[in-house]
Image (cartoon, grey):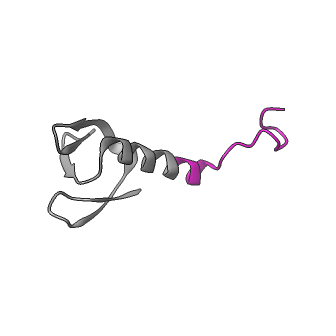
Amino acid sequence: MIALTRINGSPLVLNSDLIEQIESLPDTIIRLTNGHRVVVRETPDDVVARVVAFQRRVNGTMDAGTPGHGE
């Protein structure tokens, strides 16, 4: 789940697994797999960065020095 801000300023927590597409027209529009669209204040790059950070927290970062990870 990632925290975002709707275009009207209200907070939103979004299940990032549902993101299908992110557009900038010029507002950032997130299209979800269920067909819904969400317009947010964050840029597409910000949304992607938050998804990546969330995935790293959930899956853990793989460190080359950790046994079983890249050795």
Magenta residue check for 69: yes
Which quadrant of the rendered structure holds the C terminus?
A: top right
Answer with left or right where residue 61 lies relative to residue 33: right
Magenta residue check for 56: yes
The quadrant in which residue 69 appears is: top right
Which quadrant of the rendered structure holds the N terminus?
A: bottom left
**Residue 25 at x, y percent in the picture:** 16, 37
Answer with left or right where residue 22 lies relative to residue 45: left
* 56 or 43: nearer the viewer: 43
Answer with left or right where residue 31 lies relative to residue 69: left
**Residue 50 at x, y percent in the picture:** 43, 50
Question: Which residue is at 19% across, 65% downward?
Answer: 9
* 41 or 37: nearer the viewer: 41
**Residue 61 at x, y percent in the picture:** 66, 47
Q: Main secondary structure of the magenta part?
A: loop
Question: Which residue is at 36% across, 47% downward?
Answer: 47
Question: Which residue is at 60% across, 48% downward?
Answer: 59
Answer with left or right where residue 46 lies relative to residue 5: right
**Image vertical order of residue 12 relative to residue 48, above or below:** below
**Residue 48 at x, y percent in the picture:** 40, 43
Number of residue marks? 0
The quadrant in which residue 3 appears is: bottom left
Magenta span: 55-71
Question: Which residue is at 34% across, 43% downward?
Answer: 18
Question: Which residue is farthest bottom?
Answer: 10
* 57 or 34: nearer the viewer: 57
* 10 or 35: nearer the viewer: 10
Question: Which residue is farthest top?
Answer: 71
